[in-house]
Image (cartoon, helix red, strand yellow):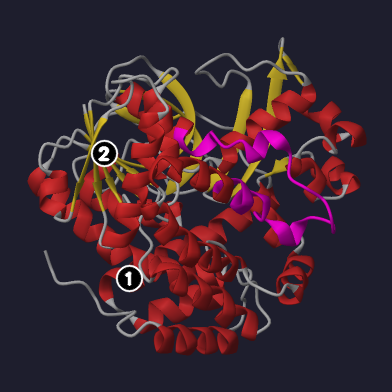
Amino acid sequence: MRLTIVGGGGFRVPLVYRALSAGPFAGLVRELVLYDVDAGRLAAIEAVLASLAGESPPGSGPQVRAVSSLAEALDGADMVFAAIRPGGTAGRIADERIALSLGLLGQETTGAGGISYALRSIPPMLELAAQMRRRCPDAWLLNFTNPAGIVTEALVPVLGRRVIGICDSASGLVHRAARAAGVTLPDGRLDGVGYYGLNHLGWLYRLESGGLDALPALLADPAALAGFEEGRLFPQEFLAGLGLLPNEYLFYYYETARAVAGMRGADLTRGESIARQQEELYPRLAAAGPGAFALWEAARRSREEGYLAEARAAGERRDETDLAGGGYERVALAAMRALSGGGAAELILNTVNTLNTAPPAGPGPGPEASAAVPGLPADAVVEVPCQVTPDGAVPLPQDAPGPAELELMRRVKDVERLVVEAATTGRREAALAAFARHPLVDSDALAAGLLAGYAAAFPGLLAAPPPR
């Protein structure tokens, strides 16, 4: 098949190519088409892939073709991965710094920064979806563009079930918890796993082994919790009382003051650190020849070491299994293989919250639909275990969330839908309401300050896209 990556100059693209060149996904893709608006980044990633190909047996990886035209990239595509960052790393820095200047969490996908990022990401992603409908209407779009849940929600009315949101944080949580609990997960299946949430806002609530739930014992075992990242993020007494294992991004909700203090006390924001690394790295990659992959790999490990640094104690390092990489691309390629007829798979994905597999007559799920996550709208995009087949990703039924978890999900989903409204109509009132309603802002005055700051940093932020 032909796989197109929109955002082909992205830092993580070599992970995808490496997985397509060896292991269970080798041979799945015959041609990899890379498209990016930044020619310099595209050339650098081409150099990394050429270097990686030189270290592999001849013919083991897909053919790579870089293009500067989106139309050319989409023509003939069977599968499209999209990972774009409107505004670049400078935009990420503004997302972080403007929130921090008001005493709020400065993070790229969560809270105020995530809203700003989504307002920039949704219009070009809608343009991509419209182009796909014209040029490759049978292709699937696997969306990595952050915030993945909000962006996927905006795309569903255009592409229906042919868009699926990809994130590896929930899958990583499940596999790390299973290792700590001594639970073996069947390959390609999530038997006994219960997980519900939105992107970057979810909980593992069941982890069965031999018909018994191993999660309560794990949550009561300080030594086992200390053996993986999510178990160390939260106090053990808190986890035992909660009875759930939160996604790592819930650190920003449960430990907000600690997170903000850590960010404000750092010399650089996460975006500033990455910008400094990439400003020096990309030109070196383009000129590195056979050594480009080794240079990229060293940079990747350094970048992974800084992930969620505000949540770790001084001197605490990430686990080697987390530094090794492999989550991001495994989820996407396992979904792609199942969608293309390589056998059904069970994966945690972002998709519409309906158990009704019949195609809806309109953009919604239809009147007979029932929700995979009880209490959330059936037409909302959620992040849950799904069965993936050539018909798409159908969510598996989950238990009803507890009152506190459901209330938080409902509130954040309301925010997400206000963001989609603001991005697609240009309504300033919707953007203000989104900022004000978010639990990590929760203030009309702060919302006004955030919108003023982001509008100044990003001219045209609420320019409604042209009608289609």
The tally of labels here is 2
Which percent across, then down, holds residue 334?
42, 26
Q: Distance of mark 1 from mark 2, alpha carbons?
A: 21 Å
139 versus 113 height, above or below: above
The residue depicted at 66 percent of the width and 56 percent of the height is: 306
Mark 1 sits on what residue?
A: 423
From the image, which quarter does the N terminus lie in? top left
Mark with earlier residue (1, 2): 2
10 sits to left or right of 439:
left
List the single residue furthest toward the top. Answer: 210
The residue tagged with tag 1: helix, strand or loop? helix
How crowded is the residue under tag 2: few (<14 C-alpha within 10 Å), some, or many (20+)?
Answer: many
* Residue 351 visible in the picture: no
Q: Name the amino acid type tagged 2.
A: Arg
Q: Quadrant of the C terminus?
A: bottom left
Q: Is residue 188 above or below residue 325?
A: above
Q: Which residue is mark 2?
A: 162
Residue 168: x %, y % from top left: 53, 40
Question: Is-magenta flag for residue 312?
Answer: yes
SS under mark 2: helix
Q: Amino acid at mark 1?
A: Ala
The crowd level at tag 1 (other Cα within 10 Å; few <14, some 14-19, many 20+) is many
Point out the stretch of residues depicted in magenta.
300-329
Q: Position of residue 290 (x, y in %)?
A: 41, 40
Most foreground residue, 254 or 25: 25
Q: Residue at x 25, y 62 (%)?
A: 37
